[in-house]
Amino acid sequence: MKTETELIQDFYSVGGGFIASQEKNSIEKECVRTLYPCHHGSDIVKYCERFGFKRFSDLIIINEESWRTQEETRKEALYIWQQIKECIYKGVNKEGILPGGLNVTRRAAGMNRKLLGDKIYKNKDQWFQQVVEAEENFTNINKWIACFALAVNEENAAFGRIITAPTNGASGVIPAVLMYSQAFTDFTSEDDIVRFLLVAGEIGTLFKKNATISAAMGGCQAEIGVSSAMAAAGLTEILGGSVGQVLMAAEIAMEHHLGLTCDPIKGLVQIPCIERNTMGAIKAITAANIALESDPAKAKVSLDQVIQTMWETALSMSDRFKETSEGGLAIAVNVPEC
């Protein structure tokens, strides 16, 4: 007869999506060198010019082969897209009060219902088709983008399944912008989805390597700001932007998040975090549109410079505004204990 053994171990969140246990060897470091190492935006420009890559994602696809085949990369990216759709679908079909004591009311479901009117759907694919066929005007599209972002972050606040991009608190920006591209633009192929996610991911690594993606280290500029830059780059890529325009879009998005603090009320990722994702998504789309109409050669600020500036800003920022709930809205808004 088999006996059961209970194993107990403590793990700690150390910021930026990393976890560690108490053991000294809990974090294993395994270096994988890609064919074309990209540690800065300038590296991406250099390799694309040297080897004639017309698209940013062409370079990233080759580098991804250091871990998996192109077929595996494509499969995993499309799996992420399906999980994004599932998360948004769940979020737009749930109402009520979010847990935690702030009594925040879910809003995505109400927005979805008003935008679709009396249309009926039974699953996420039918719902998505209804969104695609819904009336398109600036106001409605703007509301849909907000609805997508709210849906994801309300799911996050309710312990639902999300796609961390680059963090849980900033997980609504990339899904909102990617869903926007699939519902309201002509660039809706599976290839577009894969390229969007690859480029967004690569931009995220540049911030992770040269600054931070942790609000505890850099304020919300490191989370919403980074996610907005990632989404702007991915959208610019599939809308036909050049390598320079993709990097420019990421720079523009981050430039206008510099100094953004992290001051969640009661330490919950709800206020102002949920709404902040809607702002990050809109800024990403705006940044992409500006970059597509611009000449990167005339840009005064590079992505590398804005990443460096973000890190310098993070180092100078008071700890009161770095996810400690000791400053900003966290103390300005008096919420009684339950």
Image (cartoon, rainbow, N blue to C red):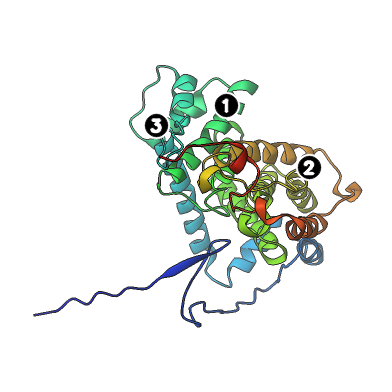
- Secondary structure found at label 3: helix
Depth order, front residue of 80/318: 318
Write down the residue under mark 3: 126
Q: Is residue 60 left or right of residue 149?
A: right
Amino acid marked by disc 3: Gln
Farthest-out residue, bottom: 25
Quarter of the rendering occupied by the C terminus: top left
* Chain-order first, disc 2 or disc 3: 3
Q: Which residue is mark 2?
A: 291
Q: Residues within 10 Å of mark 3 (few under 14, many from 20)?
A: few
Name the residue rendered at 67%, 56% in the picture.
319
Q: What residue lies at 41% left-to-right and 49% top-to-bottom? A: 161
Q: Nearer the viewer, residue 139 or 245?
A: 139
Asked whether residue 137 appears in the rendered view, the answer is: no
Q: Quadrant of the N terminus?
A: bottom left
Q: Quick one: which residue is furthest to the top in this view?
A: 118
Q: Amino acid at mark 1?
A: Lys
Q: Position of residue 155 (x, y in %)?
A: 44, 42
Three-letter amino acid code of the residue under disc 2: Ala
Residue 202 in the image: state x and y as whole percent.
65, 59
Image location (x, y in percent) of residue 123: 35, 34
Tell me if residue 259 can be seen: yes
Q: How far across and down, in percent of the image, does residue 316 sit? A: 77, 58
Taking 29 as reference, is 326 above or below it? above
State the SS at label 1: helix
The residue that label 1 is drawn on is 143
C-alpha gap between disc 2 and disc 3: 34 Å
Q: Quadrant of residue 33?
A: bottom right
Q: Of the two numbered discs 2 and 1 on the same chain, state the one appearing first in sequence.
A: 1
